[in-house]
Amino acid sequence: MGLKTRDLRQNKDAIEISVTQLLKDFAKFKKEQRYIKYDDNHLLGIYKNIVWMSEVDRKLINKLEDIQKRQRNQYLKDNSKEYEYKKWSDDPISTKVKEPQVLSRLIIVGSVIVTIIFIALIILTFTKWIG
């Protein structure tokens, strides 16, 4: 068996950072030369906004990457070379057609029969007039 080692991976998510880590980072932030003239409450508000906005930016970047990936896949799907399928219905882009209902089938068949009878009657009447 192999040696067991400790998992050293860390999840650096701004929401899950502990309060002590935030305070340590704030202490470093507060010691910068340009922030010495402000009071601690004002600086803490600024620091919280910076941390929150960096988290929001990170989430927006992740969403943007997902959207770009979907758009790229759609573009490749739309602009890919035409592939000949054995059946046209196998093509994923083709739209599926609903089967006609029983009533509409009966109407179509009935109208075809009535049309054939009407044509036969017209032929009979013309032959009687001529002959």
Image (cartoon, helix red, strand yellow):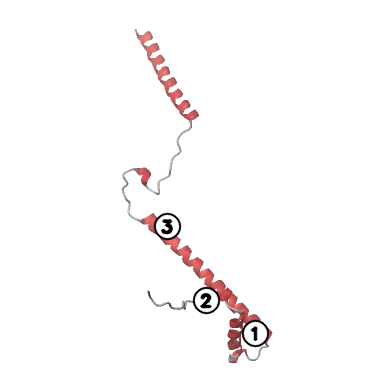
Sort mark 1 into few (<14), some (14-19) or many (20+) by Cα contacts within 10 Å.
some
Sort mark 2 into few (<14), some (14-19) or many (20+) by Cα contacts within 10 Å.
few
Mark 1 or mark 2: whose residue is earlier in sequence: 2
Please, what secondary structure does the residue beneath circle 3 have?
helix
CB contact under 8 Å: marks 1 and 2:
no
Q: Residue at x 53, y 70 (%)?
A: 59
Please, what secondary structure does the residue beneath circle 2 have?
loop
**How many marks do you count on the picture?**
3
> Residue 12 bears which disc, if any?
2
Tell me the CA gap for discs 2 and 3: 32 Å
- Residue at image mark 1: 43
Q: Amino acid at mark 1?
A: Leu
Residue 100 picture location, percent across and down? 46, 33
Tell me the CA gap for discs 1 and 2: 23 Å
Q: Residue at x 52, y 72 (%)?
A: 58
Q: Nearer the viewer, mark 3 or mark 1?
A: 1
- Residue at image mark 3: 74
Mark 3 or mark 1: whose residue is earlier in sequence: 1
Q: Residue at x 64, y 84 (%)?
A: 43
Q: Amino acid at mark 3?
A: Gln
* Residue 127 vertical placement versus 37 (above, below): above
* Residue 8 vertical placement versus 107 (above, below): below
Q: Quadrant of residue 2?
A: bottom left
Residue 88 picture location, percent across and down? 35, 43
Tell me the CA gap for discs 3 and 1: 46 Å
